[in-house]
Image (tube, grey):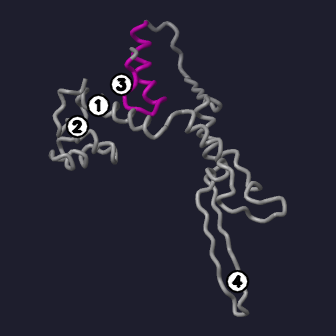
């Protein structure tokens, strides 16, 4: 399917996946930086990049279920899972998978005081629970934004052509876009 792409074009596609930037990918593949934009306009190049991304996702087991599972582990993490029944901190190796996945960093420092007593300080940082819950909720369609706009104008008696003309002036303002942008349906 992608046999018509040259080795250099395939290399560009692979390099594009590194940072998702066309100009640096073009340079790394042996093209001029300015050639990156032209390559990205080619449907066969975009299709090959999509193919490579899909293969990478399969290889890394990145799918909706795994991503939602990870977000769930973060969003529903409970700090109490770090401690045993006696209130002692569990070893990292004794944590269940969900709790371990929720941790962003774990740092232990031991210092010796003047009296020879060793003090252990443990710093634990969790991933952002609120962000994880927002991302999961957004994916599941739980947070639907509604926008209401009112127009103080009388459009009665206008012909269809005049209404379309008025819509072309108002719609870009409502969508904060440029005139004519996003109006492909007309």
Residue 37: x, y in percent?
Answer: 23, 39
Q: Is residue 41 above or below residue 24?
A: above
Q: Mark 3 or mark 4: which is in front?
A: 4
* In the displayed structure image, the side of residue 44 where residue 88 appears, left or right: right
What residue does disc 1 label?
Answer: 48
Q: Which mark is residue 10?
A: 2
Instruction: Read off the magenta span.
Output: 160-184
Q: Residue 118 carries which label?
A: 4
Mark 1–mark 2 CB contact (< 8 Å)? yes
Q: Alpha carbon of mark 1 to alpha carbon of mark 2: how far?
A: 8 Å
Residue furthest to the bottom in view is 114
Q: Which mark is first along the chain, 3 or 2?
A: 2
Mark 2 secondary-structure assignment: helix
Q: Alpha carbon of mark 2 to alpha carbon of mark 3: how far?
A: 36 Å
Q: Which mark is first along the chain, 2 or 1?
A: 2
Question: Image point 51% across, 13% down: which residue?
Answer: 155
Q: Mark 1 or mark 4: which is in front?
A: 4
Name the quadrant containing residue 169.
top left
Q: Which mark is first along the chain, 4 or 1?
A: 1
Mark 1 secondary-structure assignment: helix
Count residues near mark 4 (Cα–Cα under 10 Å), then give few for <14, some for 14-19, many for 20+.
few
Mark 1–mark 4 CB contact (< 8 Å)? no
Residue furthest to the right in view is 86
Q: In this view, does 99 lie above or below 184?
A: below
What residue does disc 3 label?
Answer: 180
Mark 1–mark 3 CB contact (< 8 Å)? no
Mark 4 secondary-structure assignment: strand
Question: Image point 15% across, 45% down: which residue?
Answer: 31
Mark 2–mark 3 CB contact (< 8 Å)? no
Q: Alpha carbon of mark 3 to alpha carbon of mark 4: how far?
A: 69 Å
Question: Image point 39% across, 38% down: which residue?
Answer: 56
Which quarter of the rendered picture does the N terminus lie within? Answer: top left
């Amino acid at each position: 399917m992608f046999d018509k792409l040259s080795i250099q074009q395939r290399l560009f596609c692979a390099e594009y996946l590194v940072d998702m930037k066309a100009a640096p990918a073009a340079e790394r593949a042996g093209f001029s930086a300015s050639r990156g934009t032209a390559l990205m306009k080619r449907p066969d190049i975009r299709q090959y990049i999509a193919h490579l991304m899909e293969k990478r996702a399969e290889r890394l087991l990145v799918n909706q279920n795994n991503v939602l599972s990870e977000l769930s582990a973060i969003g529903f993490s409970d700090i109490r899972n770090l401690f045993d029944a006696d209130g002692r901190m569990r070893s990292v190796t004794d944590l269940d998978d969900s709790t371990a996945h929720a941790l962003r960093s774990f740092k232990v420092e031991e210092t010796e005081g003047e009296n020879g007593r060793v003090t252990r300080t443990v710093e634990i940082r969790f991933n952002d629970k609120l962000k994880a819950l927002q991302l999961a909720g957004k994916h599941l369609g739980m947070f639907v934004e509604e926008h209401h706009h009112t127009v103080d104008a009388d459009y009665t008696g206008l012909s269809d052509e005049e209404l379309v003309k008025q819509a072309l002036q108002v719609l870009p303002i409502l969508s904060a876009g440029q005139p004519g942008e996003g109006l492909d349906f007309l």
